[in-house]
């Protein structure tokens, strides 16, 4: 297969993945609208307290939950998996077409990142009951890939010399992976806030809110994925610094991208600290994590577009 | 937020509301407590994040001097304020430094006492079980056979294999019917706090090494035309930024010649015209008289000489220009570095020919690597050398070189010069390779002999970078146990009737009671297994 064919196929596959994910989105939405109502979620098994005599008093595992889910959910899950595989193939072919890792410009970051978010979502779905959660993440993914295809797209091409380094693989892979975790964390945190507000106002009985995992579960998911993402992000920043030392002769130069990656790091660090500080747990910590995520997104879109810096290459 | 909120034992006491009348010592203590409290640390973290933002909007002088002055020219009103607030050098302003220094002090003030506490905790036995295990966040009971002692042994075995530190303790607080008098107290996850302390100390190491680097480090740039070279000393640099403790005597005394500098661009395809290769073949002598060595420097592949790095920065073309006077004598002949103005390497440059008995000659040039004469006049359509064209205009008069004022070699000061004209129009000539043109008014002839390349080399040393890297690595190493290990206590009590009771408590609220419960279930199952 020559590069042009691979580039063409990659584009077709990315488009196809969008169509398949659109089906998944519709199915998840239908599941919300028409699926079975309230179900015990995994997260509700908190505190098997006093006098629980046997070891068997466990919440049903996720697989058991799956048996009680609607057909819509099944379709949504299946198409999400299919779309992810298709997108993954598109990403790989993009790499083949360009003769390098497909992480050279914003279009490629967007499709690779979306693929990783989808994989992370699927992994989490094996563990947690994520109905209502999946619909938002899928919508977000569709939006991101749509944006990538329409606005960010540039044809596959070799890297400019500045990007030809093994550190591209390490640095960008780590940054994209961390961003994928943070994205899942952002959705979980947003839903946490929705559920929290609804609970406090006593309006959790609605079709939408009642299907959200409880606040404890949402909080746990968001903390876990962010706690996973944070060391990876730290590593990405450090790997970037090492690369900068090779590429530019200084490991830290307050380039806008560097500055914003540090800002993201600091705000996520604040989130982690807030969680262990009385008076800051819960809603406040959640808001901090949303602020942190917005700095991450600004770093991805805003810094490339608005500011002049050393990271401005490879097209917008 | 969490359904189960275990007592949070790792919290600082809430800071007092405010300073009542206090002695200086008390006031100092109050201030110290505030500074080292988590709330203030959180506030400082936010402040640092917010304070860092303007530095990404206003181009920083040190990182990008050209972009910085360019920004100031485009935003003159904002620039006045940016200057007043020190925004062009934001990251070395007193207030930015104050924030991170306070944060560092807060961090150290928080960490140091915790080291002592943790060191004691490491030597302390886990506490005896509370009287009612059922009050703990997670708890389960299990009727077993085989005798209470065997059960206790099995439980000890299981807990040890799960990496708990296990102590047999006197179970004084338990009702007699629930306990045989000896119970197990177990604790795990000391590494969490160890990692946490390591992480924070490692951050201090990173900050200190950055500070050291900014004191002793330096960065110089030097423009070298292919075939030329330079000896490493500040006077050879076109630009030098250095820390306060930088000593020019510390520069490694190497000399370097750029034998060959290749610039290549993508000839076709979607990325046509974007750079595909910059490569400098150099010869260097590590010190005067050393054996010359040959190396290739590429982007991302600097030359390291004794801890100093030589990087390729931006490249450009240097047209080889020869000027002869009216009598045919050569008055100027050398490659002239032209500065690229856009992606197609349309470049501008000047030639200054001071002359003793005649007016000085100045030439202003536009170099087009692949030149065409389009509707907008001459332009370059590709950065590679497909059809090099040199467009010249000329001036005669006084170049002002003898005024003692430093002049840019890339700019012509035409205040005391008159433009050469031909037939009433300003003189302008487009030359291809090898072309010569006679200047009007007998000012001489100019020949475009060829094109060389030039490269901006950066010579830099970042002192303390190894230490910074070590700090960063330790920070990540410390982060992992901090985030992924749970500090957890488990108690095991066996009644004379061989009913096993186990309870667990996470010492830092994780908001994840399900996980604690899972572990107890696994422990119970393993004990049963052990007994069977």
Image: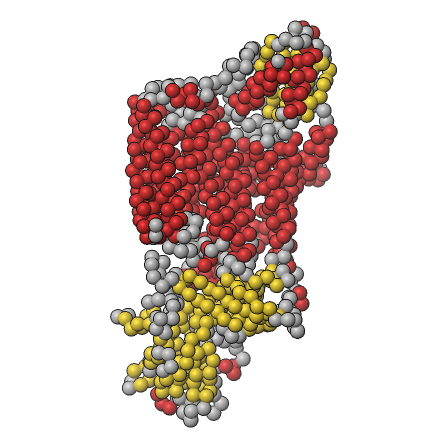
Q: Position of residue B34 (x, y in %)?
A: 62, 37
Image quarter hosting the C terminus of chain B: top right
Of all residues shown, which one is farthest toward the front? Answer: A1
The answer to whether one can see residue B283 in this image is yes
For the point 46% across and 81% down, which residue is it? Answer: B352
Count of marks, rendered view:
0
For the point 31% across and 29% down, which residue is it? Answer: A27
Image quadrant of residue B77?
bottom left
Decide which of A71, B486 is in the foreground and name it: A71
- Residue B273 shown left or right of residue B360 in the figure: left
Q: Is residue A72 above or below residue B50?
A: above
For the point 64% across and 22% down, which residue is it? Answer: B159
Q: Position of residue B224 (x, y in %)?
A: 51, 71
- Please name the colour scheme applied to the rendered image: secondary structure
Q: Is residue B193 above or below residue A149?
A: above
Q: Is residue A38 above or below residue A118?
A: above
Of all residues shown, which one is farthest toward the bottom? Answer: B327
For the point 66% across and 73% down, which residue is it? Answer: B289
- Residue A108 shown left or right of residue B27 in the figure: left
Image quadrant of residue B436?
bottom left
Decide which of A125, B149 is in the foreground and name it: B149
Decide which of A8, B420 is in the foreground and name it: A8
Q: Position of residue B291 (x, y in %)?
A: 64, 71
Q: Position of residue B93 (x, y in %)?
A: 56, 54
The answer to whether one can see residue B238 in this image is no
Of all residues shown, which one is farthest toward the left? Answer: B375
């Amino acid at each position: 297969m020559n590069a042009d064919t691979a580039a063409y196929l990659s584009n077709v596959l990315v488009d196809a993945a969008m169509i398949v994910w659109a089906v998944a989105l519709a199915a998840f939405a239908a599941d919300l609208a028409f699926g079975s109502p309230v179900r015990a979620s995994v997260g509700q098994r908190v505190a098997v307290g006093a006098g629980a005599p046997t070891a068997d008093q466990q919440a049903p595992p996720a697989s058991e939950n799956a048996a009680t889910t609607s057909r819509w959910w099944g379709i949504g899950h299946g198409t999400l998996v299919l779309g992810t595989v298709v997108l993954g193939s598109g990403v790989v072919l993009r790499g083949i077409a360009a003769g390098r890792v497909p992480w050279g410009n914003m279009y490629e970051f967007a499709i690779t990142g979306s693929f990783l978010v989808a994989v992370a979502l699927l992994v989490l779905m094996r563990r947690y009951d994520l109905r209502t959660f999946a619909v938002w993440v899928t919508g977000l993914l569709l939006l991101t890939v749509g944006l990538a295809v329409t606005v960010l797209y540039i044809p596959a091409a070799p890297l400019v010399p500045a990007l030809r380094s093994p550190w591209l693989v390490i640095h960008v892979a780590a940054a994209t992976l961390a961003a994928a975790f943070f994205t899942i964390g952002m959705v979980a945190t947003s839903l946490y806030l929705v559920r929290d507000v609804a609970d406090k106002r006593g309006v959790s009985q609605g079709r939408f809110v009642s299907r959200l995992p409880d606040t404890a579960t949402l909080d746990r998911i968001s903390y876990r994925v962010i706690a996973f993402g944070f060391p990876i992000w730290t590593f990405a920043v450090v790997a970037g610094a090492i690369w900068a030392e090779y590429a530019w002769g200084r490991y830290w130069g307050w380039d806008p991208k560097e500055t914003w990656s540090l800002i993201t790091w600091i705000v996520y660090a604040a989130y982690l600290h807030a969680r262990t500080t009385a008076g800051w747990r819960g809603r406040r910590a959640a808001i901090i994590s949303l602020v942190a995520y917005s700095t991450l997104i600004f770093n991805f879109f805003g810094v490339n577009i608005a500011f002049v810096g050393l990271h401005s290459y490879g097209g917008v | 937020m969490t359904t189960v909120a275990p007592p949070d034992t790792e919290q600082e006491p809430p800071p007092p509301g405010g300073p009542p009348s206090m002695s200086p010592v008390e006031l100092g203590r109050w201030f110290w407590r505030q500074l080292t409290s988590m709330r203030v640390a959180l506030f400082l973290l936010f402040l640092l994040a917010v304070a860092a933002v303007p530095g990404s909007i206003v181009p920083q002088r040190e990182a990008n001097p050209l972009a910085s002055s360019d920004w100031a020219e485009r935003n003159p009103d904002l620039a006045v304020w940016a200057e007043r607030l020190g925004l062009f050098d934001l990251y070395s302003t007193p207030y930015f430094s104050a924030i991170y220094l306070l944060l560092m002090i807060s961090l150290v003030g928080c960490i140091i006492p915790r080291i002592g506490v943790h060191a004691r905790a490491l030597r302390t036995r886990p506490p005896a079980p509370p009287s009612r295990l059922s009050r703990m966040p997670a708890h389960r009971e299990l009727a077993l056979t085989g005798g209470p002692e065997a059960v206790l042994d099995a439980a000890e075995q299981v807990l040890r294999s799960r990496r708990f530190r296990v102590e047999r303790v006197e179970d004084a607080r338990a009702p007699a019917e629930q306990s045989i008098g000896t119970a197990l107290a177990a604790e795990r996850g000391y590494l969490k706090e160890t990692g946490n302390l390591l992480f924070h100390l490692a951050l201090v190491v990173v900050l200190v090494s950055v500070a050291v680097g900014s004191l002793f480090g330096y960065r110089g740039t030097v423009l070298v035309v292919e075939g030329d070279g330079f000896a490493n000393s500040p006077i050879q640099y076109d630009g030098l930024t250095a820390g306060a403790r930088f000593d020019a005597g510390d520069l490694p005394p190497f000399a370097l010649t750029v034998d060959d500098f290749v610039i290549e661009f993508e000839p076709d395809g979607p990325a046509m015209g974007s750079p595909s290769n910059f490569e400098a073949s150099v010869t260097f002598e590590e010190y005067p008289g050393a054996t010359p060595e040959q190396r290739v420097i590429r982007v991302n592949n600097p030359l390291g000489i004794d801890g100093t790095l030589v990087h390729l920065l931006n490249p450009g073309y240097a047209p080889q220009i020869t000027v002869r006077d009216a009598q045919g004598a050569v008055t100027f002949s050398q490659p002239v570095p032209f500065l690229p103005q856009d992606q197609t390497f349309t470049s501008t440059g000047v030639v200054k020919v001071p002359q003793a008995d005649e007016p000085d000659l100045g030439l202003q040039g536009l170099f087009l690597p692949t030149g065409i004469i389009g509707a907008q006049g001459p332009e370059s359509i590709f950065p590679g050398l497909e059809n090099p064209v040199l467009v010249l205009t000329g001036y005669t008069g006084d170049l002002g070189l003898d005024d003692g004022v430093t002049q840019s070699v890339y700019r012509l000061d035409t205040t005391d010069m008159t433009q050469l004209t031909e037939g009433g129009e300003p003189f302008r000539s487009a030359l291809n390779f090898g072309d010569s043109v006679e200047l009007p008014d007998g000012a001489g002839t100019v020949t475009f002999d060829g094109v060389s390349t030039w490269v901006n080399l950066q010579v830099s040393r970042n002192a303390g970078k190894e230490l910074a890297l070590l700090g960063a690595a330790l920070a990540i190493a410390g982060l992992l146990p901090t985030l992924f290990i749970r500090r957890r206590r488990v108690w095991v009590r066996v009644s004379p009737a061989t009913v096993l009771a186990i309870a667990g408590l996470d010492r830092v609220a994780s908001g994840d009671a399900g996980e604690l419960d899972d572990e107890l279930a696994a422990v119970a199952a393993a004990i049963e297994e052990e007994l069977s």
